[in-house]
Image: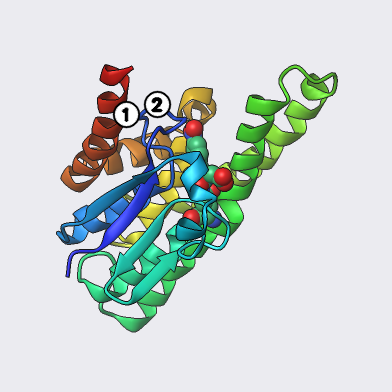
Amino acid sequence: MIPTITAFERSPDRGRGLARDMRVRWALEEVGQPYDVRLVSFDQMKQPAHLSLHPFGQIPTYEEGDLVLFESGAIVLHIAERHSGLLPDDADARARAIAWMFAALSTVEPPIVERAMATLFEREKPWYEARLPALDESVAVRLRALSLQLGDADWLDGLFSAGDLMMVTVLRRLSRSGILNAYPNLLAYVARAEARPAYQRAFAAQLAVFNAWAINE
Ligand code: GTB
């Protein structure tokens, strides 16, 4: 059965692959599962039809037969559990890979998103300049630890897993800030992941949505 995911009709990231459908697309590409995409506007996301799929009126969602899922982490975990290629067979290694997925979403992503939100919406506020160093430090605390953990390994725990997929999508949010430049192994880690054919296909697919919209504007 071909699943259907939802994505922004007009992504505010202008095709840079930062919206959270990217991690779902990437996971589907890694496991070789074809998928359909339904594009939604900000207005449609808040209408009953979409709210019946996603209680918070967001993207991405995932529909596969009677199964409806929201939350990109849950969707990627579902894909990884139903197909081979994103989680190790060994039970302990599998549990560790899932722990890295949670670490990406609940430990590393929050300070990165908080900083991104401040740079987007608070730049003109009187407190912005004073607040930024604390936001930067919250991000740095996580990046220092992650960089130490990764060391000179290719991936966080053996072979590439859904944990790496999730962590890289989180780190990519920092790409334009230059913050990753202080962590050459993390920069290389992100580049290594971005070079994967599955990543490239997912990136091209979401970029095509933006380009199609831009041509018609
Ligand atoms: N925890 C949820 C998940 O992981 O699935 C979070 C989902 C979420 O935040 N979805 C966003 C959304 O639907 C899109 S991805 N927002 C609309 C709304 O809440 O009304 C977040 C996002 C948006 C834009 C950029 N960007 O421009 O760079 C990056 C990420």
Above-or-below relation of 88 to 161: below
- The residue that disc 1 covers is 210
Q: Quadrant of the N terminus?
A: bottom left
The quarter of the picture where residue 119 lies is: top right
Query: From this viewpoint, is residue 1 visible?
Result: yes
Mark 2 is surrounded, within 10 Å at the Cα level, by few (under 14), some (14 to 19) or many (20 or more) other residues, namely some
* Residue at image point 21% right, 65% down: 85
* Most foreground residue, 208 or 89: 208
* Residue at image point 35% right, 62% down: 62
* Callout 2: CB less than 8 Å from ligand 1: yes
Measure the C-alpha gap from mark 2 to mark 1.
6 Å
Where does the image place residue 217, in percent across and percent down from the top left? Answer: 33, 17
Where does the image place residue 70, in percent across and percent down from the top left? Answer: 46, 63
Above-or-below relation of 187 to 156: above
* Callout 1: CB less than 8 Å from ligand 1: no
Above-or-below relation of 210 to 147: above
Q: Amino acid at mark 1?
A: Phe
* Most foreground residue, 51 or 88: 51
In the rendering, which numbered label is found on residue 109? none
Is 200 on the left-hand or right-hand side of 105?
Answer: left
Check if mark 2's residue and mark 1's residue have beta carbons within 8 Å.
yes
Element at label 1:
helix
Q: Residue furthest bottom?
A: 91
- The residue that disc 2 covers is 14
Where does the image place residue 105, in percent across and percent down from the top left? Answer: 53, 56
Q: Amino acid at mark 2?
A: Arg
Is 38 on the left-hand or right-hand side of 113?
Answer: left
Dot 2 or dot 1: first in sequence order is 2
Element at label 2:
loop
- The number of numbered badges drawn on the structure is 2
* Residue at image point 37% right, 37% down: 9
